[in-house]
Image (tube, rainbow, N blue to C red):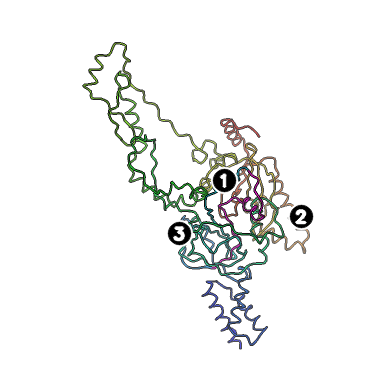
């Protein structure tokens, strides 16, 4: 009998693996099959398979499956790579990131949006078909990853139950550890998870992003908006690359007919597309292509441009009044007037009176140097020779790509602790709203686990162990309270100098992370004061 049960377990496991590509734990499936056999010893294999499958889909994936996402997944050095194969993952939540979260929340409640900006936006896009872009948080029960809907995927919608199991089917492009999904890359298996049903209901996902308290009875019965199919967010690769000249060219010489049906002229199709979001994930991918394109371009290099400008400025023009331009020719996109014939010109000059304007030689103007920007390595206001010091208002003005590629220093105070200090999966969790002391602009941030451990002088694992032992060792409670007090003191100081950067792998609105506290030394104060003085920033 024992042999038969073992064979049944192995047969059911093999069938589940073939159908769902799951990496099932031997202990879980053994206990599950034995439970149903004990309930009905005469049950057949089909009964066992169907009931085991149902239990698998309704259980959290960490209880049923082994780890499939390697520890090195988020640490790969190659920006873009392709994932081949198939894996089963659990969806924690889904979010439409192509539309304001407030607008989506209002629509759930069928409320009108009394907002002039919204009305303006609605009037502008009245005849525009809606497009969407879903972001999915996925997990194998041990690691969390994210995926983006790059083309319209019919099976995705906001009513998918949190905890549903899906299969990622390769080959699929992975950029910056984010899966770029197309219709052939995803298959819905089914299931749900009771523990996520309320907390990750779509309304509560939106409320958390809006910094509002979640509700115990979120809206479940609502109508999905109708979106345009085919392409969700068009890839820039499908558009013809257009090289923009370094200086404007007069319309008169642009005689070549413009290509008809240029997709870039279709404003309606592009009106509601957030290209900034795509810039940060596609910029590095397209970089090599752009460099190759520059090698074949007909435009001049910067050195050639400067040399030609000097040559033009040094031309000697005779003293005649508004000479007639007989023709115009194009030389490297610079318009140079073609002067009349020299013999005709000399006769005209001889007839001029002595009041003619004397000939002078043009002075070559100096080529101005480009002023360093907030993102440059040679930025003049750099803290500890590493971090460009900015205000939060300046940080907000940067593109997503610029926020991700370097770490910035800001001087702030904590305005509000959004989530109380806690521990999840042996990591410190601390989220807050900070306010810039100069621009008075606020920003939602998350303190890294390493930083909180440094402030508390205890790792999350150490604190978790203390919490488990406090009942038998009450004296440990004082050490726990002391660690929490250290964190509270650090974040409640009047002003703090911190470093921030962006990590798109974190939930939206908490993707700005605080990595370090910096010492406000005399040298640092001088750098801060010099920037404030040079840029005319006053204390808000």
Question: Which residue carries the number 2 mark?
Answer: 478
Cα–Cα gap, marks 3 and 2: 50 Å
Q: In the rendered image, which quarter contains the N terminus?
A: bottom right
Q: In the rendered image, which quarter contains the C terminus?
A: top right
**Is 125 situated left or right of 453 in this image?**
left
**Is 499 situated left or right of 235 in this image?**
right
Residue 97 within the magenta-colored segment of the rendering: yes
For the residues carrying marks 1 and 2, which lies nearer the camera in this image? 1
* Extent of the magenta region: 88-115
Tell me the number on the disc at residue 123: 1
Vertical side of 510 occupied by 82: above or below = below
Q: Of all residues shown, which one is farthest toward the right?
A: 474
In depth, the one of 384 and 5 nearer the eye is 5
Tell me the number on the disc at residue 324: none
Q: Secondary structure at mark 1?
A: helix
Residue depicted at x 61% and y 71%: 57
Tell me the number on the disc at residue 81: 3
């Amino acid at each position: 009998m024992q042999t038969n049960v073992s064979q049944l377990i192995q047969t059911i496991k093999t069938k589940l693996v073939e159908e769902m590509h799951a990496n099932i734990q031997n202990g879980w499936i053994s206990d599950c099959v034995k439970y149903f056999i004990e309930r009905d010893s005469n049950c057949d294999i089909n009964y066992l398979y169907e009931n085991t499958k149902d239990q698998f889909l309704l259980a959290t994936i960490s209880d049923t499956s082994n780890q499939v996402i390697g520890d090195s997944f988020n640490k790969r050095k190659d920006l873009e790579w392709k994932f081949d194969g198939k894996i089963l993952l659990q969806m924690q939540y889904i979010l439409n990131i192509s539309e304001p979260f407030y607008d989506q929340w209002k629509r759930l409640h069928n409320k009108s949006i009394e907002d002039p900006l919204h009305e303006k936006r609605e009037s502008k896009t009245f005849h525009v078909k809606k497009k969407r872009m879903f972001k999915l948080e996925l997990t194998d029960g041990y690691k969390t990853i994210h995926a983006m809907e790059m083309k319209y995927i019919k099976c995705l919608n906001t009513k998918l139950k949190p905890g549903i199991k899906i299969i990622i089917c390769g080959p699929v492009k992975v950029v910056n550890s984010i899966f770029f999904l197309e219709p052939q890359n995803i298959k819905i298996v089914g299931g749900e998870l009771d523990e996520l049903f309320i907390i990750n209901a779509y309304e509560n996902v939106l409320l958390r992003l809006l910094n509002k308290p979640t509700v115990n009875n979120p809206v479940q019965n609502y109508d999905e908006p109708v979106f345009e199919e085919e392409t969700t967010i068009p890839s820039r690769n499908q558009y013809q690359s257009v090289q923009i000249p370094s200086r404007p060219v007069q319309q008169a010489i642009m005689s070549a007919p413009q290509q008809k049906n240029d997709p870039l002229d279709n404003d309606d199709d592009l009106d509601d597309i957030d290209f900034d979001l795509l810039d940060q994930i596609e910029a590095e991918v397209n970089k090599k292509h752009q460099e190759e394109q520059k090698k074949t371009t007909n435009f001049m290099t910067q050195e050639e441009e400067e040399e030609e400008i000097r040559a033009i400025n040094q031309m000697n023009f005779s003293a005649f009044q508004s000479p007639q331009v007989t023709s115009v020719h194009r030389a490297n996109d610079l318009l140079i007037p073609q002067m009349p014939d020299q013999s005709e010109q000399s006769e005209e000059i001889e007839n001029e009176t002595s009041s003619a304007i004397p000939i002078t030689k043009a002075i070559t103007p100096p080529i101005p140097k480009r002023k360093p920007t907030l993102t440059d390595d040679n930025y003049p206001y750099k803290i500890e020779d590493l971090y460009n010091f900015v205000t939060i208002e300046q940080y907000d003005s940067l593109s997503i790509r610029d926020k991700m590629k370097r770490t910035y220093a800001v001087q702030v105070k904590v305005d509000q602790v959004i989530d109380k200090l806690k521990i999840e999966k042996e990591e410190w969790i601390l989220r807050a709203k900070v306010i810039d002391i100069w621009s008075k602009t606020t920003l939602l941030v998350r303190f890294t686990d390493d930083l909180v451990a440094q402030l508390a002088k205890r790792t999350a694992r150490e604190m978790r162990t203390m919490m488990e032992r406090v009942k038998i060792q009450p004296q440990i409670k004082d050490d726990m309270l002391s660690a929490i007090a250290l964190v509270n003191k650090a974040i409640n100081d009047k002003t703090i100098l911190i470093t921030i950067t962006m990590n798109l792998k974190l939930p939206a609105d908490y993707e700005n992370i605080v990595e370090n506290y910096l010492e406000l030394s005399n040298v640092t104060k001088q750098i801060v004061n010099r920037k404030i003085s040079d840029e005319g920033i006053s204390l808000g």
